[in-house]
Image (cartoon, rainbow, N blue to C red):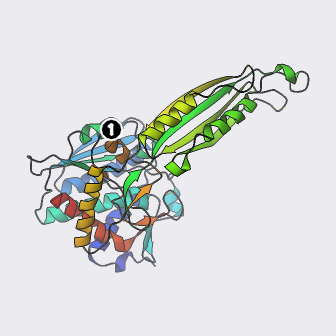
Amino acid sequence: MSEHSSVPGEAAAVLERLRRLVELESPSGDAARLTALADEIARALTSAGAAVTAIDVPSQGRHLRATLDGDAALPPLLVLGHMDTVFAAGTLAERPFAVAGGRATGPGVYDMKAGIAVLLQALADMHARGAQPRRPLRILLTCDEEVGSHSSRPLIQELATGAAATLVLEPALPGGAAKTARKGVAVYTLRTYGRATHAGLEPQTGINAITELAHQVLAAQALARPELGTTVTAGLIAGGTASNVVPAEAWAELDVRFSTAVEAARVDAGLHALTPVVAGARLALEGGVNRPPLERTAASAALYARARDLAAALGFDLEEGTAGGASDGNLTGALGVPTLDGLGPDGGGAHGPDEHVLVADLPRRISLIVALLQQF
């Protein structure tokens, strides 16, 4: 039996919001489902006093842009989140939303529908009391974060311009810590070209593109500096046409993670400097940085310190940490806007079958969001 009905007060209210969001499945690229979810969230934002604008994205879904009034003499505050999830439609039937053992589970519950539910509950609570944010509030909830934020990136950059800070509703690190730094991401496709010939009759006249690619993958991965937070991973590889043909083409997709822009530039230069090893082979490199790193700066550290103090006044410790994955907060941080990520609820299992949030953390997160909106 679900524990949902036995949860008291504010936790029960936010759990009901969360249930509705999770039960509206929203895989990246599913325009109809993402639009339905956006409409549900838009109604909640409007009910909380926000002015909402829907921005349709062909074949993707709908972004939501919302504003609330604050002191117009102060720079605005930007709040970011995303509505899309990595889970295919139909996952809900296999793992329906449930509350048991102090956990709420279901596809997308942790990354990041709980963060949205917490924001909606915080705004509803403020509206019920007639309270407003201290600063003008800009909210952007996007439909394409999990697939690279290609259509939302200009919106994020536009809304971040002139903002005092960005608060990102991505989930907290397991254990509850906020994210004051995130690695950046680059994706490259490395292609090698040789010459095809019969593998049995005259292999010596061929140029083996797979052999060349093997050399290049090892050279690329040697650019990693784990001690600096830099990794280079060949995650996909393919080549050739048949086992009895010396392959003329091969390719590998490289995932690069880095903690600083300096490291991103070093690896990029190293990849572009690769040269063929097999006589007669040719190389081609495509791709580059998808998201810059979210680096911990003095300004972002001050923002975190403010959030930590507010959390302490509410009776809990808000620690900080670094995440290996990227978010839309990386984009605002790269613009020089102080950015604090991981303000969503504690939990774990992101992108997997054990994805969950801790019910006991939900009221704390609501209170922290309210405090940030009203006191920062």
The crowd level at tag 1 (other Cα within 10 Å; few <14, some 14-19, many 20+) is: some
As helix, strand or loop, the secondary structure at mark 1 comes to: strand
* Residue pictured at 74% horizontal, 25% vertical: 278
- Is residue 177 positioned above or below 233 on the image? below
Which one is in front, 204 or 66? 204
**From this viewpoint, is residue 22 visible?**
yes
The image quadrant that residue 155 belongs to is: top left
* Residue pictured at 65% horizontal, 36% vertical: 219
Residue 98 in the image: state x and y as whole percent: 44, 70
Residue 153 in the image: state x and y as whole percent: 35, 38
* Residue pictured at 51% horizontal, 33% vertical: 268
- Is residue 80 positioned above or below 192 on the image? below
Would you say 365 lies left or right of 103 here? left
- Is residue 59 positioned above or below 314 on the image? above
Give, as a three-letter code, the residue at label 1. Asp
Residue 370 in the image: state x and y as whole percent: 21, 63
The image quadrant that residue 99 belongs to is: bottom left
Would you say 360 lies left or right of 253 here? left
User: Label 1: which residue?
Assistant: 56
